[in-house]
Image (cartoon, grey):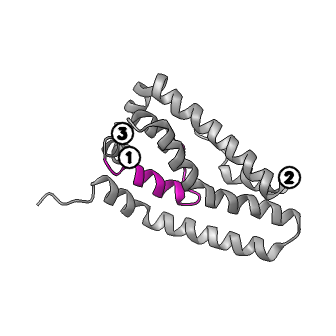
Amino acid sequence: MIAPIPGEVFQIAGGYIYGVFLGTIYTVAGMLLGASIAFYFTRFLGGSFMKKLLKKKKFQWMMSLMNNKKLSVFLFALFFIPGMPKDMLIYLAGLTSIKPLKFFGILLVGRLPWLIASVSIGSNIYQKNYTLTVIISVIALLGFILGLLYKDRLINKLSGLGKSTT
């Protein structure tokens, strides 16, 4: 499923309710559980639906990545950019031959820094430490804006869509 509520909302809530340590553990567990369901659903049951979806013009870049040697680098880069919708990438990975352990390692390492930042925002709000909350939020916002600005270049570079044919 594609989540109607961004994961960052739950990450911040986890930090607010449980603090940084337990909030991070619970959030990582939830992220990995949801990603596992999506990954294996696609791998075992949903491949034909996803392939139909990926044939649409706006998803052509995903099709070009499916058998690309740079898939791992691409997945890591997009998982690392804060605020980017990651659901489609999890489904995409389920269609590839990437080994599950490698995929979940990439997912965890790519998402963990910003996940901890989101959880710590929630914890700092609870502790009324607004200065640190603002600092982390501004850094995350800058990362998100830079990700939005350079996402298409990154996709084109890693998928080979930006290469000229001359």
Q: Tell whether position 75 is magenta.
A: yes
- Which residue is nearer to you in this view: 70 or 154? 70
Near mark 1 (Cα within 10 A), the count class, few <14, some 14-19 or many ≥20, is few
Marked residue nearer the N-terminal end (1 or 2): 2
| Disc 1: which residue | 58
Give how far across and how far down residue 158 sits, in percent. Answer: 34, 56
Residue at 50% in and 64% down? 147
Q: Quadrant of the C terminus?
A: bottom left
Mark 1–mark 2 Cα distance, whole angstroms, equals: 39 Å
Mark 3–mark 1 Cα distance, whole angstroms, equals: 6 Å
Q: Is residue 36 left or right of 154 when viewed as pictured? A: right
For residue 17, which numbered disc appears in the image?
2
Residue at 49% in and 36% down? 100
- Which residue is nearer to you in this view: 150 or 19? 19
Q: Tell whether position 66 is magenta.
A: no
Above or below residue 82? Residue 22 is above
For residue 56, which numbered disc appears in the image?
3
Q: Amino acid at mark 1?
A: Lys
**Bounds of the magenta span?**
69-87
Near mark 3 (Cα within 10 A), the count class, few <14, some 14-19 or many ≥20, is few
Above or below residue 127? Residue 15 is above
Mark 2–mark 3 Cα distance, whole angstroms, equals: 41 Å
In the structure shown, which secondary structural element does the residue marked by tag 3 occupy? loop
Whether label 3 touches label 1, CB < 8 Å: yes
Whether label 2 touches label 3, CB < 8 Å: no
Near mark 2 (Cα within 10 A), the count class, few <14, some 14-19 or many ≥20, is some
Give how far across and how far down residue 123 sits, in percent. Answer: 82, 61
